[in-house]
Image: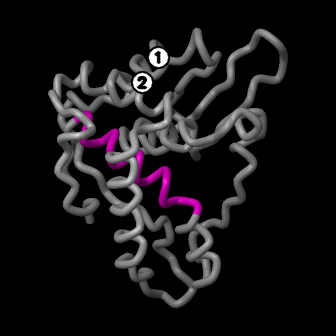
Amino acid sequence: MAQAPALFDSRVLEDVFNACFLASERTRLVGGAAEPLYLPASATGQSHTLFYREDYFASALHEVAHWCIAGPARRQQLDFGYWYAPEGRDGEQQRAFEVVEVKPQALEWLFSLACGYPFQLSVDNLDAASGQLPDTGEFRRRVLIEARRRQLRGLPPRAARFFDALTAQFASGVSLADLDLEGPGR
């Protein structure tokens, strides 16, 4: 697998995120985790921490997307209070996963476009119980619909702030309104 250029160093995303949200939201983005995790502050005056996997650029964008969607009550819960079933989900569990993932993956895709980074749709179930990868057609369609909806109606405030900061940092020159949404990457 080819490595992404040095331009797509996940530490740059940490810097952008922390510049946007460390002071205002008391939340920092930190890489190097074995698994993604959102850890709310355990005491007044401490920062919340959003961990992303290893040093993966896409993981950082994805976790930020989840954080941008989570409301105030969810941001007080470990991992936003979401359930997670590991790889090997059956069909019903996979459909439940996809329902939860449509919005964050649409945002992740828009963030990727703001950076000029290739987006990869994630079904996150490589060891499905059937031994086959799930069909991604319907999930892909719903992510596209959600991305177009966000393009027309605008991003949530924190997502808009991060999107704008990414376009500035990566000098992509894109605006949300001008994005050509053809369908998320395979």
Q: Is residue 132 magenta?
A: no
Q: Residue at x 29, y 51 (%)?
A: 119
**Principal secondary structure, stretch drawn in magenta:** helix
Magenta-drawn segment: 100-115
Query: Which three-letter amino acid code belongs to the residue tagged 1?
Result: Cys
Assess disc 1: are there few (<14), some (14-19) or many (≥20) residues with their C-alpha within 10 Å of its C-alpha: some
Query: Going by the image, does 173 lie left or right of 186?
Result: left
Front disc: 2 or 1: 2
Whether label 2 touches label 1, CB < 8 Å: yes
- The image position of residue 33, as x and y in percent, is 56, 38
From mark 2 to mark 1, how far is it between C-alphas?
7 Å
Q: Earlier along the polypeptide chain: callout 2 or callout 1?
A: 1
| Residue 8, image quadrant | top left
Quarter of the C terminus within the rendering:
bottom left
Which residue is under mark 1? 20
Query: Going by the image, does 146 lie left or right of 110?
Result: right
Q: Is residue 112 magenta?
A: yes
Q: What's the image's color scheme?
A: one colour
Q: How many marks?
A: 2
Choose between 151 and 96: the one closer to the eye. 151
Quarter of the N terminus within the rendering:
bottom left
Numbered tag placed on residue 161 in the rendering: 2
- The image position of residue 41, as x and y in percent, is 76, 23
